């Protein structure tokens, strides 16, 4: 697995934790060990520029996902083929505001956004209610299982 992390902000980001989270999700979704992913942390201006350019929406957003090879989840007996999953772009400043509103820390919010984005890159969506239920249930299960496994290692 190649998971590239770049932090172009002044926010503190535990890059190792994001790599471990991505690996955890890759394993849970039965992705090929050679799957590639990029996670980029940007400031509000850079996120605003991307949001306008790619979504035609004003202002910064929390996260954007840019799929590449349109990979889909595999199974234990039939893992996904190798490929470039895509790029995840996170804005820590927007994530921190959302975290305060949700009553948890910015780091947890950015981990949630990472799982959310990886699921989008794997073809999950939440436009319809049933899709939303499936995606958000899986997102919650993956994040809580990762956090529990991480806490068990402490």
Image (cartoon, rainbow, N blue to C red):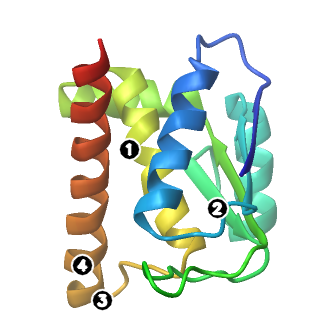
Residue depicted at x 46% and y 35%: 110
Secondary element at image label 1: helix
Residue depicted at x 44% and y 79%: 124
Secondary element at image label 3: loop
Mark positioned earlier in the residue sequence (3 or 1): 1
Q: Nearer the viewer, residue 63 or 12?
A: 12
x, y percent for residue 49? 80, 48
Per the image, the residue denoted by label 2 is: 65
| Quadrant where the image shows the C terminus | top left
Residue 62 in view, yes or no: no
Residue depicted at x 38% and y 44%: 112
Q: Viewed as shown, does residue 28 lie left or right of 47?
A: left
> Disc 3 versus disc 2: distance between alpha carbons?
19 Å
Tell us which disc is closer to us: 3 or 2. 2
Mark positioned earlier in the residue sequence (3 or 2): 2
Per the image, the residue denoted by label 3 is: 128
Tell us which disc is closer to us: 4 or 2. 4
74 lies above or below 19: below
Per the image, the residue denoted by label 4 is: 134
- In the picture as drawn, the residue positioned furthest to the front comes out as 77
> Disc 1 versus disc 4: distance between alpha carbons?
15 Å
x, y percent for residue 109? 37, 34
Q: Nearer the viewer, residue 23 or 110?
A: 23
Per the image, the residue denoted by label 1 is: 112
Tell us which disc is closer to us: 3 or 4. 4
């Amino acid at each position: 697995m190649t998971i590239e992390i770049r932090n172009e902000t002044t926010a503190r980001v535990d890059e190792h934790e994001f790599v471990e989270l991505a690996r955890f999700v890759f394993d849970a979704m039965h992705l090929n060990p050679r799957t590639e992913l990029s996670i980029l942390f940007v400031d509000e201006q850079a996120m605003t520029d991307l949001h306008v350019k790619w979504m035609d929406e004003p202002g910064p957003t929390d996260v954007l996902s840019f799929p590449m090879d349109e990979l889909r989840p595999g199974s234990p007996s039939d893992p996904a083929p190798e490929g470039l999953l895509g790029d995840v772009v996170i804005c820590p400043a927007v994530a921190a505001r959302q975290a305060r509103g949700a009553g948890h820390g910015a780091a947890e919010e950015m981990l949630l956004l990472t799982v959310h984005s990886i699921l989008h890159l794997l073809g999950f969506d939440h436009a319809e209610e049933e899709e939303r239920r499936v995606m958000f249930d899986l997102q919650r299960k993956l994040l809580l299982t990762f956090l529990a496994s991480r806490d068990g290692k402490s």
